[in-house]
Amino acid sequence: MRILAVTGHLAEDLVKESAIGADVLVLDVDVASFITPQMLRAAAPQGYDLILIPGAITSDFSQVEKELNTKIRLGPKHAVDLG
């Protein structure tokens, strides 16, 4: 199973350390909870079975999930809990 963890610049190092076995996509935003569906749509990650977005996000990613044909789920609120 290919998993992608999405984050922002400030949490990049912590997510890379904690997301063992997953790829990490760092979007052009400092605070990961400010990631929008449009940002993920523009990045258009392909080839993943699951995309984990930060747990503090409140936006609806269901349309992007359909467009990418990939499950998008909330990960933990704290990056250290990814492991």
Image: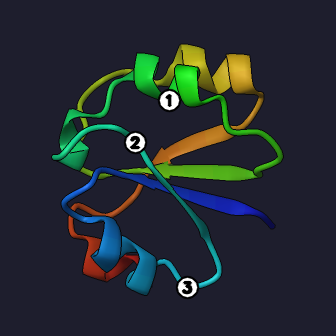
Question: Residue 7: where, in percent of width, then height?
Answer: 36, 53
Q: Residue at x 22, y 61 (%)?
A: 77
Give the tally of numbered discs: 3
Q: Residues within 10 Å of mark 3 (few under 14, many from 20)?
A: few
Measure the C-alpha gap from mark 1 to mark 3: 21 Å
**Closer-to-camera residue (13/82):** 13
Name the mark on residue 40. 1
**In terms of image quadrants, where is residue 44?**
top right
Identify whether 83 is placed above or below 72: below
Specify whether 39 is left or right of 71.
left
Specify whether 32 is left or right of 50.
left
**Residue that badge 3 annotates:** 20
Which amino acid lies under the numbered mark 1 shown in the image of this protein? Leu
Viewer-side label of 3, 2 = 2
Measure the C-alpha gap from mark 3 to mark 2: 19 Å
Which amino acid lies under the numbered mark 3 shown in the image of this protein? Ile
